[in-house]
Amino acid sequence: MAAPFSYSVEIQGVSAASSIWKIVISLLFIIAFIPACLWLMKRFQLAQMKLGQSDIKIVNVQSLGAKEKLMLVEVEGERMLIGVTSHTISHLKSFSSGSHSFASVMEDVGRESASDSKSGGNIK
């Protein structure tokens, strides 16, 4: 009677070890599967954006903080600078299609504000 008992304990030990390995392999598969799915979703979204003939294009994004950013958006040939926060989207300035680059416009704004502060004028 002692022999069958030791045999059953040995089989349970082997099955317990194999079930632990099955769990570890399953967890590794899930951990690898999640990033793979996220990568595929991102790739398909980019493909949809390229295939879709959208009239709205995001030209540039500048982060200003954790939840604030400036976005330069082009809609039907017109560029708009918008401010985006977690609660609002504000239109800041529009640029015609033949206007200067964003950097040159920002320099002009800087010069205007500097001349206003020197002359004591109010900032618009």
Image (cartoon, rainbow, N blue to C red):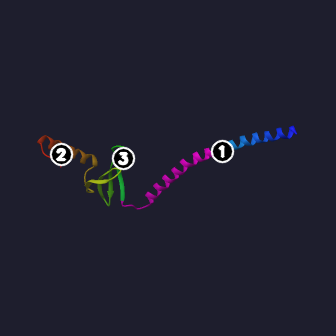
Residue 44 screen position, x and y as percent: 49, 55
In the picture, measured across the screen, residue 87 lies left or right of residue 116, that is right
Res. 23 mark:
1
User: Measured along the vertical axis of the image, is residue 54 above or below residue 64?
Assistant: below
Percent x, y of residue 27: 61, 45
Q: Quadrant of residue 8?
A: top right
Q: Amino acid at mark 1?
A: Ile
Q: Badge 3 is on which residue?
A: 67
| Inter-mark Cα distance, 1 to 2 | 66 Å
Q: Main secondary structure of the magenta part?
A: helix
Circle 1: element type? helix
Q: For mark 2, what is the residue?
A: 112
Please give left or right for residue 118 compared with residue 26 in the image. left
Q: Residue at x 47, y 55 (%)?
A: 45
In the image, the segment drawn in magenta is: 26-55
Q: Earlier in the sequence, mark 1 or mark 2?
A: 1
Please state which of the two labelled residues, at mark 3 or mark 2, is closer to the viewer.
3
Cα separation between marks 3 and 1: 40 Å
Q: Is residue 43 magenta?
A: yes
